[in-house]
Image (cartoon, rainbow, N blue to C red):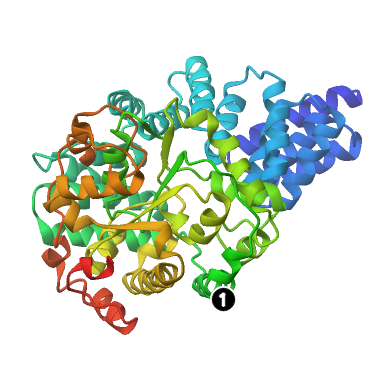
């Protein structure tokens, strides 16, 4: 057998081993392959895939880098590199690698789906939908491709298309955890048929905790629909415990970040900054998740002069692009230290340039990423004419609303009652600091007030935004448009007070959360309006 024939046989065996879950065997074959031909593109590509399977990002970067050095038009490796660079927080390198992947116009649906995934990670949801659609057109029964496209439709508020895809996924793969969870979130339960099905699926032996969590949260949500409060809490607690096993929440790093923010950004810092970008187009809606940010986003974007751009990562990505900051943590003390060296005008301009594709044709747009509350001073410097709206809500309702929600890759503090409460205490302290230092730059709005006296709150909000009153903002639930969050289904109805005081349904079970809030100096009850000047 010639070397070429031997290499072909080894490659076939290596890819087959990887596909059957024998990563160690595939790695051994890679070494043999590259020992025979160190410049074989397929050998390095297989090595990269094996390294990904093993969680060895460094080797994967080296392997895919070797492929692109040997074959600069290898779109699959460029796409893999782009995703790895995003994971490492190296946004500039991710941008460059993604451009190379797209330039190759790949026809492989696996590569098309991967490109869509990277566009999503970079907040480019319009382009992501295009690439997910290409992959699904090539392989219309591939569950992973269909899930990505369905989730993208949810982002754009295209609930009908998303539901149809989730139903199709369950026809193909009846046990799909994410499809079951997504269906539970998108419709209101009227009986316990789906609850029983999810409970059975969650008890399958050997199921990974990350997958168990989907089923538990689905049961919790539908049990709440049926007002079975004890059953709902039990499911939420099981889901949170399962998810907490799979995430690495670094509370010490969060404490360090909050301390750095308070120490570094004050009135004198802002007064000494160079001019920012003068655009008044952005309206930032921020705060904690599940506190009414989606409600306020819908109210504002129902105005004829405003478009909703959804939850954008672009402001923090602009910091990374301009500073070349490479920490994989989405937010950290290091990120904000890097921001100190950026000219405000450049930061504001980069943000506006990278949001152009998603902000519509109106003169104003809403960026509704809750975590932008960390960036209030930087937004104030970079975009001094932008408006900032901050949601406040009863601390127990706010904390419990996060605890009972399964998030994608953010809010890692939310899966443990005490960690959630401590985080909320830090957030409240930071916002109190921002209010003292930069209070004239943002408008507090109470969730409770918005749901109980909508028109008055809408008028006050529009005055702050310097927009004329429009009746459509009060009738926001009748407007079409994207809803990019866990509140997508609920926000299609008028404002209501059903969620006010919801935590009291679970008062006994939530005692650890209440205790920790009190310890952090946050009263667990009382009027939220006390926070609003």
In the image, residue 394 above or below residue 287? below
Q: How many marks?
A: 1
Residue 153 visible somewhere in the drawing: yes
Mark 1: few, some, or many residues within 10 Å (few <14, many ≥20)? few
Residue appearing at x 27%, y 65% in the figure = 532
Quadrant assignment, res 80: top right
On the image, the x and y values in percent for residue 164 come to 29, 23
Assign the N terminus to one quadrant of the image: top right
On the image, the x and y values in percent for residue 159 come to 29, 29
Q: Identify the element where label 1 is drawn.
A: helix
Horizontally, is 31 left or right of 478 in the view?
Answer: right
Horizontally, is 371 left or right of 203 in the view?
Answer: right
Assign the C terminus to one quadrant of the image: bottom left
Residue indicated by mark 1: 263
Quadrant assignment, res 233: bottom left
On the image, the x and y values in percent for residue 24 come to 68, 48
């Amino acid at each position: 057998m010639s070397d070429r024939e031997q290499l072909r046989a080894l490659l076939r065996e290596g890819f087959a081993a990887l596909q059957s879950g024998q990563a160690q065997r595939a790695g051994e074959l890679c070494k043999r392959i590259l020992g025979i031909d160190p410049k074989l593109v397929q050998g390095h590509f297989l090595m990269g895939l094996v390294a990904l399977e093993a969680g060895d990002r460094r080797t994967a970067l080296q392997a895919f880098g070797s492929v692109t050095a040997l074959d600069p038009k290898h779109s699959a490796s460029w796409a893999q590199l782009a995703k790895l660079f995003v994971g490492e927080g190296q946004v500039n390198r991710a941008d460059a690698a993604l451009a190379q992947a797209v330039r190759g116009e790949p026809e492989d649906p696996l590569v098309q789906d991967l490109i869509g995934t990277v566009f999503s990670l970079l907040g480019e949801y319009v382009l992501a939908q295009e690439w997910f659609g290409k992959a699904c057109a090539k392989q219309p029964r591939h569950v992973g491709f269909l899930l990505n496209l369905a989730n993208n439709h949810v982002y754009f508020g295209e609930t009908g298309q998303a539901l149809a895809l989730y139903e199709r996924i369950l026809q193909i793969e009846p046990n799909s955890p994410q499809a079951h969870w997504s269906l539970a979130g998108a419709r209101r339960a009227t009986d316990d048929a789906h609850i029983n099905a999810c409970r059975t699926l969650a008890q399958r032996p050997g199921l990974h905790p990350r997958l168990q969590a989907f089923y538990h949260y689905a049961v919790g949500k539908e049990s709440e629909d049926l007002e079975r409060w004890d059953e709902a809490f039990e499911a939420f607690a099981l889901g949170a415990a399962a998810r907490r096993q799979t995430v690495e929440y670094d509370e010490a790093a969060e404490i360090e970040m909050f301390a750095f923010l308070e120490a570094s950004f004050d009135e004198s810092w802002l007064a000494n900054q160079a001019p920012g970008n003068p655009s008044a187009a952005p309206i930032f809606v921020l705060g904690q998740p599940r506190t009414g940010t989606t409600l306020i986003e819908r109210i504002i974007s129902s105005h004829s002069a405003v478009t909703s751009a959804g939850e954008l990562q672009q402001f923090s990505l602009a910091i990374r692009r301009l500073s070349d900051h490479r920490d994989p943590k989405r937010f950290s003390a290091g990120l904000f230290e890097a921001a100190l060296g950026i000219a405000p005008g450049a930061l504001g301009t980069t943000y506006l340039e990278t949001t152009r594709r998603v902000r519509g044709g109106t003169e104003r747009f809403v960026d509704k990423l809750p975590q932008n509350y960390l960036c209030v001073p930087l937004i104030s410097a970079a975009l001094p004419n932008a408006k900032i709206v901050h949601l406040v809500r009863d601390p127990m309702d706010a904390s419990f609303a996060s605890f009972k929600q399964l998030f994608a890759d953010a809010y890692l503090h939310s899966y443990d009652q005490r960690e959630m409460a401590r985080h909320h205490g830090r957030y409240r302290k930071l916002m109190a600091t921002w209010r003292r230092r930069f209070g004239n730059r943002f408008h507090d709005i109470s969730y409770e007030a918005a749901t109980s006296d909508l028109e008055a709150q809408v008028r006050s909000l529009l005055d702050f935004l310097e927009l004329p009153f429009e009746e459509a903002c009060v009738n926001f639930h009748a407007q079409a448009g994207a809803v990019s969050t866990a509140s997508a289904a609920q926000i299609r109805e008028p404002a209501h007070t059903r969620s006010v005081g919801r935590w009291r349904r679970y008062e006994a079970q939530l005692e650890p959360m209440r205790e920790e809030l009190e310890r952090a100096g946050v009263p667990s009850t009382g009027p939220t309006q006390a926070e609003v000047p």
